[in-house]
Amino acid sequence: MKQTWIGVIGIVALFVVAMVGMQLAVPSKADVIKVEFDIQEAINNAQNGDVILVPDGVYPGGIDFLGKAIIVVSEHGPSKTFIDGGETTFGVRFNTTEGPDSILEGFTITRCTGLNGYGGGMYCGQNTGPTIINCIITKNTALTNQPYMETGGGGVCCYRFSSPTFIRCTISFNQARSAYDYYTQGGGVCAFYASPTFIQCTIANNSARADGGGGAMGGGIAAFYGGHLTLKSCMVVNNRVEGVGISYRMGGGICLRYGQTAKIQGCTFSGNQAIIAGCPYAASGAGVYVGEGADAVIRSSILWHDFWNGSSQEIFISDPYTNSHVDIDYSDIEGGQEGIVILNATYHEDILLYGPMNIVSDPLFRNPNHGDFHIKISSPCIDAGETGEWPNYQPTGGDKDIDGNPRIIDIPDVQYPGRGPMDIGADEAVKNAVTPSSH
């Protein structure tokens, strides 16, 4: 079957073409290959520009895109289509020359184990930049049983100079762990020298665990060594760094170190933990850890009820050797400026730029004990976000919250003395809204 294709911008149109047979007036053509038994076999036989359509079912892990600019898409989404590693192999690998036109959409990737301790559910290798849309990456593991070997990215590992984009994905219940005296990084996501982008994603209930010596860093995300991390309209919730023994623990939600930069815009952090039990060194940064020359800009975000040793600790800035920076404004931060911990050997004025438009008010989540971090219609975060318009970052254009609602919504019969047209946090409040089951 022949269909026409325009690349990433036409991803929604692909479903129209596939389901109702409409033709698009675009210049290029692509084969649509329907998988019968084996996704990898279809990839092996595909050419650049082809679309691989995957029926409902469970498929084995160990899938490699082989550097091809192809679209691999499920017929009915991640609730019906699974890539299962059987706890013995990795999930999906981009490790050659994959760019934005290498697209994976609509899968649950589960029970996968990272090769050599890295990237259980997904591995994005050097200089790759694929697009991952509407995928659930869950219950995967980055594990090593070898002494003095790092582990990273239970859900996803992004390696040197890679720049993948994740859109409307859920990365949950993954773990990175080591049984020996070394380091674990990124229960959900680990980025080494890499620049991943996450848009409308949920990163939840992941853990980085180090037993013995070494350290656990980034329960949700660990990002190191000079890349750039981008988060827009994301929820980073209920992640943790933990372990037993003398290992240190940094960044329950996110850990940024060694020159890493980050832009965090319209996000929600809550329920993340840096667990100190049994650790003689101070665990730090329950919500966000920024240290060793890292730099974070945070706008229109909620940081609330992230816990260190049983008490709230939203941001920890460690600056003993090099300049680290946090610039935060139009955000809701538990404890306010006084609740941001700064550990530095040589003070410099711009280590923390705490803007005048931040607030310190209970954001009034709907039901955080049951994982619902949307804000109530009475939340003080409504219309308290930044005033400037966001750039169009969606493949189809437009600015969306985590549920796909417009990022700027006014509720005519609800009056708040807000300071901007958008809400603080990942959720733009909608009156009488029903939370989508995918989030």
Image (cartoon, helix red, strand yellow):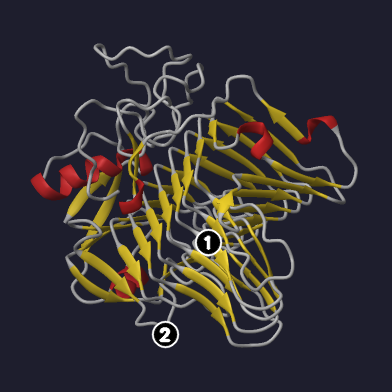
Q: Is residue 380 left or right of residue 123?
A: left
Which residue reaches farthest right? 346
Query: Which residue is rendered at x = 68% and y = 71% of the image?
Result: 279
Q: Is residue 410 left or right of residue 153?
A: left
Query: Which residue is rendered at x = 24% and y = 41% of the image?
Result: 435
- Up the image or down, 423 lies above or below 88; here it is above
Give x and y (percent) for residue 39.
Answer: 29, 71
Q: What label does residue 88 carry, if any?
A: 2
Q: What label does residue 179 carry, if any?
A: none
Q: What label does residue 240 carry, if any?
A: 1
Amino acid tagged 2: Thr
Q: Quadrant of residue 341?
A: top right
One can see residue 73 in this view: yes
Q: How far apart are marks 2 and 1 (CA)?
A: 25 Å
In the structure shown, which secondary structural element does the residue marked by tag 1 occupy? Answer: strand
Give x and y (percent) for residue 292.
Answer: 78, 51
